[in-house]
Image (cartoon, rainbow, N blue to C red):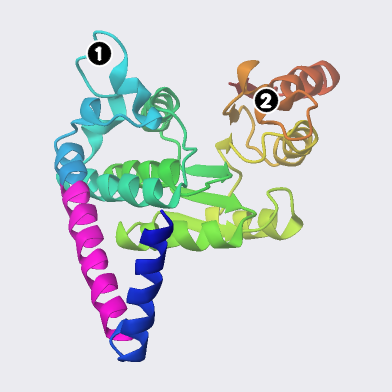
Amino acid sequence: MKALQYRVRQFYTTMKAEGVLPALLKAILFVLRKINFVCSKDKKEIVMNRLKVADYRNCNEKRFWWWHIENATHDPYFYYFLTDEEKEIMAEWYIDTSEKQFIGESAPPMMSFLYGFIGGNYVRRIVQLGHYAGYSTLLIGFLLKRLNYGKLFSIDIDKDITEYTQKWIDKAKLNDYVSLFCDDSCSLAAIDKCSSYLGGAPDIVYIDSSHTYDHTIKELNTWIPILRNNGFIFLHDASEFAAEFDRTNKGGVSKAILDWSKNNLITHHPQPLLLV
C-alpha cells in the first residue's frame, strides 16, 4: 500500500512539474461530464418514452403508487382528459421534479374527484391554498382550458417554488386560466388579489398547504366566510396517517377539521360542506 501511495505521489509531482496536470484534469473532467450527460440523456429518454405512452407501471418511484395497485389496468380518470401535448408536459414535469426532489403532489384519487366535481358542476371560481411544484395546478388548468370557462387562483408562501410553478404554467400556456400569488394563504393581500382576479366569491377552496393544525384552523376561519353560499371546501391529507405531516405535532389537518367543525359548523347558515 505504501509503495502504491508513493507511486501516486510521484506521478502527481511529475505531472505538476511538467505542466501536464491541469490539462490532464480538464480532459478527465470533460470525459466524465460527457459520460454523465449521455447516461442522464438516455435515462431521461427512457422515462420520457414510458410517460408519453402512460407507461407509469414501469416507473418504480413511490409517487407512481397508483399504477402499481394490484390488477389496475387503466389510468386515473383525469388522464383521459389530457391531450398528447399535455401528457408530454406532465411527463417532463415528472422528470424535472424528480431530479430536483420536488415530490409531494396530490394523489390521483383526489385529482380524479376534483375533475369530476369541477366539470360536473360548472365550477367557475376556484381557490387553491398551496400549489407547491404545480402538479394539481397544471391539471386543474388543463381542465379549465378544455372546458373553456373558469379561473384558478393559487396561493403559496414559497417564493422560489411559486416561480418554478409559474414556469410550467407558462410552458403549458395556461395563463388565461391560472393565476399564482406568493403570500401566506390567509393574508389580506391574497384575499384582495383573489377577489379581483375571480370577480366573485369562490365556488370551491382546495386546501393543501402547510398541513399544520393551527394554520388549517386559520385557513378555515379565513376562507369559509368568503366562500359563496353552499360552497365547498376540499382538504387534502386529512387522514389520521397524514397527521404526521404536521411539523408542530398538534394533530394536523384531521384534528383541525374535527375541532373546527365542533366549534363552528353548526353556527353557519347556509352551511359550507367540508370534503376531505
Tell me how many marks there are: 2
Q: Position of residue 81 (x, y in %)?
A: 24, 35
- Element carrying mark 1: loop
Crowding at mark 1 (Cα within 10 Å: few <14, some 14-19, many 20+) = few
Q: Which residue is mark 1?
A: 72
Q: CA distance from mark 1 to mark 2?
A: 29 Å
Q: Does any portion of residue 25 appear in the rendered image?
A: yes
Left or right of residue 69: residue 235 = right
* Image height of 17 relative to 1, above or below: below
What type is the residue that disc 1 sits on? Ala
Q: Residue at x 71, y 31 (%)?
A: 246
Badge 1 or badge 2: first in the primary sequence = 1
Left or right of residue 177: residue 47 = left
Q: Residue at x 33, y 41 (%)?
A: 143
Q: Position of residue 113 (x, y in %)?
A: 42, 24
What type is the residue that disc 2 sits on? Glu
Q: Which residue is mark 2?
A: 244
Magenta-highlighted residues: 22-45
Q: Specify whether residue 79 is painted magenta.
A: no
